[in-house]
Image (spheres, rainbow, N blue to C red):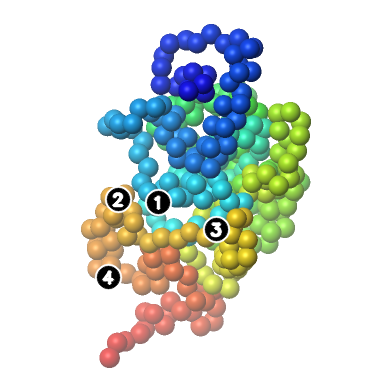
Amino acid sequence: MALQDLLNISSKKKIGLSEERVRAIVPAAREYIAFWREYPDLFVDFLVRGTRTEIKDGELKFYFYQRVFLRAAMRHQYLYAVFPRAYSKSFLSVMVLMIKCILYPRCKLFVTSGGKEQAAGIVKEKVQEICTLVPAFKREIDWGRGVTLEGKDYCKYVFKNGSYFDNIAARESSRGKRRHGGLIEECVGVDGTILSEVIIPTMNVSRMCMDGSVHPEEQLNKSQIYVTTAGWKNTFPYDKLIQLLVWQIVKPEKSIIMGGTYRIPVLVKLLDKNFIRDLKMDGTFNESSFDREYESKWSGTVEDAFFNAEIFDRSRKLN
């Protein structure tokens, strides 16, 4: 329990640390960190409850699928997740970035989305939510004036170990930036050319460890998380999904694909089943749109195609 003594998260008593004691704890700390990189959900459990097993009312409690997502995101260089609304995908993805910033000192990560203001809004909202549920995360961030920034269209969260993550614009203006990995939020709304020619090339550097060493093969380097609702086939996001699906087959240690439908958030009561029922009964109900937003099914044509699948869906008659 050496690291428990060092972190002392579940106890309020102060512990005196000497150089000798810190050196004695380092081997155990390395083992814990290596373990938590593989099991990030247990890391968060530890931050919330320490070694206590019972869960108090109001405490963060992961559902099974959320634990699977966190572990997949930390264990693979490429993760592509197609999830419906109410799946907690933004919450979990931002939490992954925060965990990486803590467990990988000096790492530099990014979030991008269809609009810079949209990305900033998502990041700020989820960071605040996570820090409320897990106060230990908040203590790891340097909230000093001019360090961590929370603006309308730009947010940057700097951690005390030298790591940070921010939101960058999916535009030409982001060309030349350097990051070790990132999150592409709702990638169906991101321009494919900008993503491939500007955003992805920002990850052409490897993290420098605290001792000055560099390990290009480290899982963090060039790590990419794509989370989105389904969109249209014959587009860059769909092609990227197929590419990573092939990679999952030929190099499963690097790439993983995940997906889900509205039934899981309904099952765990994150989504009201009556809402889905009312949505289907609404006079303006569109089956193709519902399939994309809640069934994670990609539509067969691009949105501006001459023969649009949505038109045929509305005109179809069953005999």
| Mark 1 → mark 4, Cα distance in angstroms | 33 Å
| Residue located beneath label 2 in the image | 268
Of residues 184 and 7, which is closer to you in this image? 7
Classify residue 205 as left or right of residue 303: right
Q: Is residue 269 visible?
A: yes
| Mark 4 → mark 3, Cα distance in angstroms | 38 Å
Neighbourhood count class around disc 1 (C-alpha, 10 Å): few under 14, some 14–19, many 20 upward: few
Q: Amino acid at mark 2?
A: Val
Q: Amino acid at mark 3?
A: Ile
Q: Position of residue 249 (x, y in %)?
A: 58, 66
What label does residue 65 carry, if any? 1
Q: Amino acid at mark 1?
A: Tyr
Q: Is residue 184 visible?
A: no
| Residue located beneath label 4 in the image | 283
| Mark 3 → mark 2, Cα distance in angstroms | 24 Å
Q: Position of residue 158 (x, y in %)?
A: 61, 30
